[in-house]
Amino acid sequence: MTKVLMVASEATPFAKTGGLADVIGSLPRALRAQGDEVAVVLPRYRSISLQGLQRVYNDLPVWLGSTGYPVTVYLARSADVPFYLIDCPSLYDRDGLYSSSGKDYPDNAIRFAVLSMAAISIVRHIFRPQVLHVHDWQASLVPVYLRRLFDLDPTFMGIRTLLTIHNLGYQGRFGREVLPQIGLDEGVWHPNGMEFYGDLNFLKGGIVYSDAVSTVSPRYAQEIQTPEFGFGLDGLLRLRSDVLTGIVNGVDYNEWNPETDELLPAKYSADDLSGKRLCKRELLKEFGLPVDHLDRPVIGIVSRFARQKGFDLIAQVADDIAAEDLSLIVLGTGEPQYEQMFRNLAWKYPQKVAVRVTYNNRLAHLIEAGSDMFLMPSRYEPCGLNQIYSLRYGTIPLVRATGGLDDTIEDGTGFKFWDYSGHAMLQMIRHALAVYKNRQEWLRMMRLAMQKDFSWDASAARYSALYASLTGFSASANTA
Ligand code: ADP
Ligand code: GLC
């Protein structure tokens, strides 16, 4: 049993922009089932109402250099896991989590430095763990502060740190001038510290100063050690390969399960798929596509519109895709160029392509349920959750074989392509469409996909063993 404090910038049901929130919202509970004691530190964003929350600490001391930040700590419980919410309205009471109208907040370095320093203050005053498990660049200053500022402080002695990288593409890069504002001195400004091509790099600091580093699939753990996927940090990651592991994400089947999903117009299971057909009809209606050809395959997409997700491949072969007998239904928000591309496609092929540029959880569930296939042509994908949800919904994933997509999808439960090219993706889509015509074969694939189990148990056990190895207890001693 290990006592763990997680630090992250998003978690369901409190605040979400992507898969990180799903993980932080569900992994702690799974760890409790393994016998670990887990609490989470999260900013109190505007989307989190204070109503009903318990105020547990007034004026938590949070100092970055000589500047003090007024912080109140609130406690919320989700599935019995304590979430310590850092309330500092001048920093977090805003429209977005990291940006608004597509522009990053200019004080993000300070906002997440305060999150990290507040977490350290929580360790001192409220919850002292054996392991601090920090996620992504937003929490990466926790190990930096511990090593650079509190190395000799007995309060923190023996506490081990684990950094999980959910996406190496986001590193938290800022100018050198923020150093004093985040309470650090020039001692970290060197290539073996936080300096990175003339910038200050938060994630690099996390990788350098943590006791161990993990990422969210074994394949991605290998990939990030190569120049192609390393975003300039592959050399450092190779240096740290002895403490670098990949643990594939689990998913929360309480939320993503067609047998119990309250957000669907009809529920269904592998034994009775009639509800899936109803969902398909509703989906087509909802997106304004013709419902007279219910047998025509629907390909769904739910995604952040970012370069990572590979939608430029769709632009390369859009007309060829539209020429096939299929419907394409897209839900997403993000970079304007992809929004525009999908909008143009829907305008050009109104009978076949429909897009909603918005963030909407109900529609995300409806697309998972009502589609026949789910397309993720990612350039890179640390883990990916939607393909795992798709499996459970009997919606066959069409993926590029990279990172977690390659680790979670196999022959028989989905289709893959390797080359990052529109042509390779088109060939895969055509192959899937041909198999779809063979109803028996398709049903066999659906049933196999729906049986796959990616619940958290196995992955939580691996985190649990990792914590135990960090604190010096072996996993077997732990369960003895
Ligand atoms: P990433 O974290 O890189 O965005 P993941 O596949 O790990 O990718 O997780 C994405 C999560 O965000 C899923 O839960 C998905 O359903 C959700 N999501 C993404 N875009 C939208 C959207 N436009 N509306 C609703 N949910 C979305
Ligand atoms: C990141 C990755 C995604 C992963 C998620 C949760 O946002 O892009 O692949 O599933 O984090 O770990």
Image: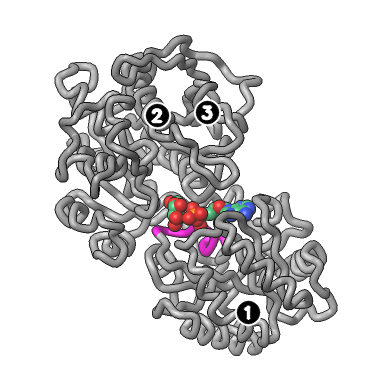
User: Given the image, on which type of amino acid does mark 1 rest?
Assistant: Leu
In percent of width and height, residue 417 lies at 44, 79
Tell me: residue 419, above or below residue 181: below
Q: Using the rendered view, name the quadrant where residue 35 is placed.
A: top left
* Label 1 with label 2: CB-CB less than 8 Å: no
Q: Nearer the viewer, mark 1 or mark 3?
A: 3
In percent of width and height, residue 200 lies at 28, 40
Name the residue tied to disc 1.
443
Between the residue at mark 1 and the residue at mark 2, the CA separation in whole angstroms equals: 52 Å
Is residue 2 in view? no
Between the residue at mark 2 and the residue at mark 3, the CA separation in whole angstroms equals: 11 Å
Question: Tag 2: Cα neighbours inside 10 Å, few (<14), some, or many (≥20)?
Answer: some
Residue for point 72% across, 68% down: 354
Q: Nearer the viewer, mark 2 or mark 3?
A: 2
Residue for point 57% across, 73% down: 396
Tell me: residue 306, above or below residue 179: below
Which residue is farthest right? Answer: 292
Name the residue tied to disc 2.
110
User: Given the image, on which type of amino acid does mark 3 rest?
Assistant: Tyr
Question: Tag 1: Cα neighbours inside 10 Å, few (<14), some, or many (≥20)?
Answer: some
User: Given the image, on which type of amino acid does mark 2 rest?
Assistant: Ile
Q: Secondary structure at mark 1?
A: helix
Q: Quadrant of the C terminus?
A: top left
Q: Secondary structure at mark 3?
A: helix
Between the residue at mark 1 and the residue at mark 3, the CA separation in whole angstroms equals: 48 Å
In this view of the protein, which residue sits in the foreground, 57 or 345? 345
In this view of the protein, which residue sits in the foreground, 303 or 31? 303
Q: Using the rendered view, name the quadrant where residue 118 is placed.
A: top left
Please report the bounds of the magenta region as a residue range: 382-389
Name the residue tied to disc 3.
92
* Label 2 with label 3: CB-CB less than 8 Å: no
